[in-house]
Amino acid sequence: MPLTQQRHYTVGYHDLQQHHYEICEYANDAYEAIEHAKEDVPELRVHPSFIDRCTNETGLDYIWNAMSAGVPMGR
C-alpha cells in the first residue's frame, strides 16, 4: 500500500524503570504499527509486553488541520 494511504499511529511503551515513551509509525493497521515499533526500538523486540497502547492519530490530525485552517466545526 502506498505511504499516502497508510495511517499515522502512536505506539506508547515503557522501560524497566517505568519511564513512558512514544514512537510514531505509519502503517496500514495497529498490528503493523506495533511490528514497525518493534523493529525501530530494540528493547521492544526483547520485551514486547512493554507496549502499553497503539492509537490511530489520523482522525485527530484531520480535526486539528481543519481547526487550524479556520474551518468551522460543529455547525
Image: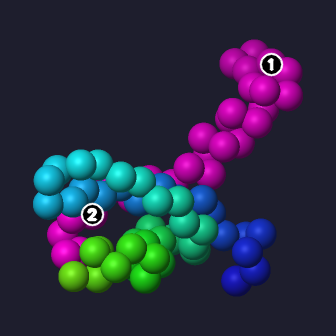
Q: For the residues marked 1 and 2, what is the alpha-carbon distance in whole angstroms?
A: 37 Å
Q: Is residue 31 visible?
A: no
Numbered-mark total = 2
Q: Is residue 33 left or right of residue 8?
A: left
Residue 51 is labelled as 2
Kindly indicate the quadrant of the structure image that contains residue 31.
bottom left
Residue 54 at what x, y percent from top left?
39, 58
> At x 21% / y 64%, what residue is drawn?
50
Confirm whether the magenta stretch covers residue 21.
no
> At x 75% / y 16%, what residue is drawn?
75
The residues colored magenta run 47-75
Q: Secondary structure at mark 2?
A: strand
Query: Which residue is nearer to you in this view: 46 or 8?
Result: 46
Mark toward the start of the polypeptide (1 vs 2): 2
Query: Which residue is nearer to you in this view: 16 or 53?
Result: 16
Structural crowding at the residue carrying mark 2, measured as other residues with C-alpha within 10 Å and reported as few (<14), some (14–19) or many (≥20): some
Q: Secondary structure at mark 1?
A: loop
Q: Is residue 70 left or right of residue 11?
A: right
Residue 10 at what x, y percent from top left?
47, 56
Which quarter of the image is occupied by the N terminus?
Answer: bottom right
Amino acid on which disc 2 is placed: Ile
Q: Are marks 1 and 2 in contact (CB under 8 Å)?
A: no
Amino acid on which disc 1 is placed: Pro
Structural crowding at the residue carrying mark 1, measured as other residues with C-alpha within 10 Å and reported as few (<14), some (14–19) or many (≥20): few
Residue that badge 1 annotates: 72
Q: Residue furthest front?
A: 17
Residue 30 at what x, y percent from top left?
44, 68
> At x 14% / y 60%, what residue is drawn?
16
Q: How is the image coloured?
A: rainbow
Image: 26 above or below 52 = below
Residue 18 is labelled as none
